[in-house]
Image: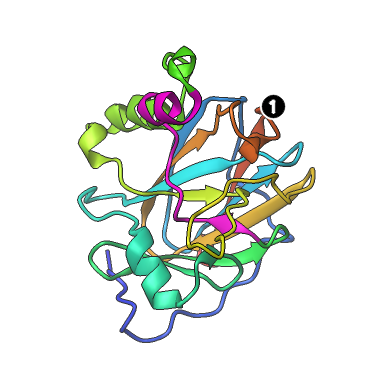
Amino acid sequence: MTRNSFFAAPVCPAKPAANKAPVHTHRVAAQAPWSGVVKRGQSIRIIDLDGQQAVDTLFYRADAFGERYSSQDTVRVQGAAYVTTGTRLISNEGHLMATVIADTCGRHDTSAGACSCESNTVRFGHHTKYLHACRENFVLEVTKHGMSKRDIVPNINFFMNVPIEPSGELAIVDGVSKPGDYVELRAEMDLLCVISNCPQINNPCNGFNPTPIEVLIFPGDED
């Protein structure tokens, strides 16, 4: 498989798969994880069915999991704090993993990370220690592919509204996504996508009410 570097020749432009039938459709229940392979040239569309639902997402190179999404490199290369149409997702080896080709929401975070039982306890009190969290979802899902919690890295939070305060601190506030909003990414290498449909109920990232999402994978031009 060809590995695309950000510094290599430009990737051919892509358009949303408006008139193509998906090769895979999956409804991810509220608070649940999901994972699937997106082949190079295919696109993955994540739909926020009811609005205001954060979708924590990780990407790994499908044939070498040691190469995975890097939030730091993605922010550095874009020179922008948020993910939206045109954003290039960069791996920890500096290669282009995916390109955002459509976005009806316009605001996706890649700095706040995933909730965990430990962070819930610190932020919201000991009574939240045993509530389900995204990190636990990620652990459940990556173990299906032979990885462990050590392979979980800073992620993208699709549809999560995290403004940067004048002090430089991150705030988690009400999401701006509407029912049916979606983000679509074209895979620039074969990818394993791992999703935690965020179960958080202690802050407004999900409107305090986690809801289902839908994942569609569309064929590429060569499929």
Membership of 199 in magenta stretch: no
Residue 64 in view here: yes
Instruction: In the rendered view, tell whether residue 34 sits above or below residue 61.
Output: above
x and y percentages locating residue 19 in the rendered image: 74, 60
Judged left or right of residue 222, residue 59 is: left
Identify residue for label 1: 209
Nearer-the-camera pick, 212 or 154: 154
Residue 147 in view here: no
> Which quadrant holds residue 25?
top right
Label 1, secondary structure: give it: loop
Residue name at image x 45 percent, y 27 percent: 120
Residue name at image x 21 percent, y 37 percent: 150
Q: How many numbered discs sit on the rendered protein? A: 1
Nearer-the-camera pick, 42 or 196: 196
Residue name at image x 66 percent, y 30 percent: 212
Going by the numbered disc 1, the residue's amino acid type is Asn
x and y percentages locating residue 113 in the rendered image: 42, 46
Q: Residues within 10 Å of mark 1 (few under 14, many from 20)?
A: some
Residue name at image x 24 percent, y 41 percent: 151
Instruction: In the rendered view, tell whether residue 58 sits above or below residue 142.
Output: below
Extreme residue in the front direction: 167
x and y percentages locating residue 14 in the rendered image: 58, 73
Q: How is the image coloured?
A: rainbow
Extreme residue in the right direction: 179
Which quadrant, please, contains the N terminus? bottom left
x and y percentages locating residue 96 in the rendered image: 36, 69
The stretch in magenta equals 107-124
Judged left or right of residue 206, residue 137 is: left
Membership of 113 in magenta stretch: yes
